[in-house]
Amino acid sequence: MRAVVTGGAGFIGSNLVDVLVARGDEVVVVDDLSSGKRELLNPGATFVERDIRRGIDAAGARVVFHLAAQADVQTSMRRPAHDAAVNVVGTVEVLEAARAAGAHVVFSSTGGAIYGECDGPAPEDSPLAPVSPYGIAKLCGEHYLSGWNRIHGSDHVVLRFANVYGPRQDSSLEGGVVSIFLERMARGDETTIFGDGRQTRDFVYVGDVVAALLAAGEHEGGVYNVGTGKETTVLGLHQACAGVAGVASQPRHEAARLGDARRSVLDVSRAARELGWRARTPLDDGLRRTWEWLAQEAA
């Protein structure tokens, strides 16, 4: 099939593009390289350097995987108008391009930022109470998708990602806590935890996320959590990262940051039931793969 991947030079997008190209699909990557990297572009894909806010061309595509985003919570706190422009206006432009092409859209949303504080694994019908402009903008994008489905009779799909980690994750972004920890441990630098470290997250490996995207590309409509359903404290993650890195690193603590939820974990039973998808990669295994990738990059 012909597929368009916005953000296809980024962390999740480039991993998805590799799989699409490997299976023989015709792939167009749309990325403005503001956070994506040219070296992550698959040579088997066609690359269009473009800001999604200016619109995209989806002609001939059967599916548009919309991954381009301003994805940093703290940036959204400092620059909410910019966050909304990329994540709301950009999403509307992608939807309009897909509508013109008759293409199916798979939209990457967020579970970690859209549910707000969780009192347990959050199902998709949980109250939505984002605590950052990033979460608010992603929720707006979801409403545009559901609205386009109602107005235009489309069957676009929303995937709400937990905290994704794995090879190619950018340690310069706040959400990349795994890559931040591992890179600093590899250099022998001090690591930092904001707050007491007992805040929890649902960490899901990028290869499992790619599998969810592919499943959603073949599915008509719906909103699905993409995570593991398991909570890990940030302190526990730090300990696990130190284990795969073979170091005895102790973190420095700084004040908790505005916009960071205390507890975030997703109920993934709907995705298992309706998409036939479930995360397969244990945290220790995923961290080991990420550490090995970092070692290869440094060699």
Image: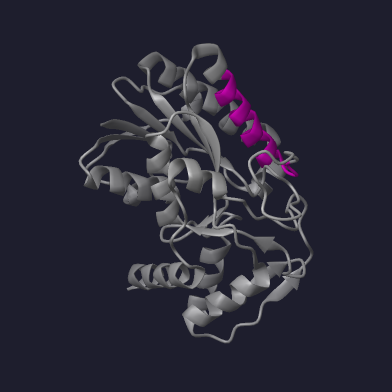
- Indicate the quadrant containing the N terminus: top left, top right, bottom left or bottom right: top left
What is the residue that sits farthest to the front in this orientation? Answer: 273
Side (left or right) of 172 relative to 200: left
Above-or-below relation of 121 to 17: below
Magenta segment: does it hold 206? Answer: no
The residue nearer to you, when weighing 12 against 147, is 147
Query: Where on the picture, by quarter, is residue 295?
Result: bottom left
User: Magenta-highlighted stretch: main secondary structure?
Assistant: helix
Identify the magenta region.
130-147
Q: Position of residue 222 (x, y in %)?
A: 53, 32
Q: In the image, what residue occupies the spot 55% across and 80% down?
A: 242
Q: Count the marks: how many?
A: 0
Eyeballing the image, is 139 above or below 237? above
Q: Nearer the viewer, residue 256 or 215?
A: 215
Q: Residue at x 26, y 39 (%)?
A: 45
**Residue 68 place in picture, x, y as percent:** 48, 38
Residue 253 picture location, percent across and down: 74, 72
Residue 131 located within the stretch drawn in magenta: yes
Q: With 216 as the anchor, is 43 left or right in this view? A: left
